[in-house]
Image: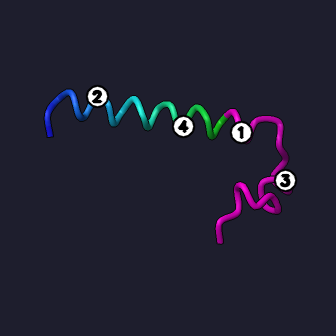
Amino acid sequence: MSRHDATVRLRHMLDHGREAVAMAQGRTRHDLDVDRQFNHR
């Protein structure tokens, strides 16, 4: 894997992490447990 590929992967992980935090912000634990968007069991 080239350094460029690693940088791109890390940027994608950071973007997705930020998106996950934004989606969960303001939700309660109960919300996260019952919302199908978060509960993939």
Q: What residue sits right under mark 2 in the picture?
A: 7
Residue at horizontal 80 percent and vertical 58 percent from the top: 35
Q: Could you say whether the residue bearing mark 3 is in a helix, strand or loop?
A: helix
Label annotation for residue 31: 3
Total marks placed: 4
Circle 1 residues within 10 Å: few <14, some 14–19, many ≥20: few
Comes first in the chain, label 1 or label 3: 1
Comes first in the chain, label 4 or label 3: 4
Give the CA separation, mark 4 to mark 3: 19 Å
Residue at horizontal 83 percent and vertical 36 percent from the top: 26
Question: Where residue 7 appears, x then y in whole percent?
Answer: 28, 28
Give the CA separation, mark 4 to mark 1: 10 Å
Q: What residue sits right under mark 4 in the picture?
A: 17
Comes first in the chain, label 1 or label 2: 2
Kindly identify the amino acid type of the residue bearing the numbered disc 1.
Met
Kindly identify the amino acid type of the residue bearing the numbered disc 3.
Asp
Give the CA separation, mark 1 to mark 3: 11 Å
Q: Is residue 11 left or right of residue 22?
A: left
Looking at the rendering, the stretch of residues picked out in magenta corresponds to 22-41
Kindly identify the amino acid type of the residue bearing the numbered disc 2.
Thr
Choose top left, top right, bottom left or bottom right for residue 32.
bottom right
Q: Could you say whether the residue bearing mark 1 is in a helix, strand or loop?
A: helix
Kindly identify the amino acid type of the residue bearing the numbered disc 4.
Gly
Circles 3 and 2: CB atoms closer than 8 Å = no
Circles 1 and 3: CB atoms closer than 8 Å = no
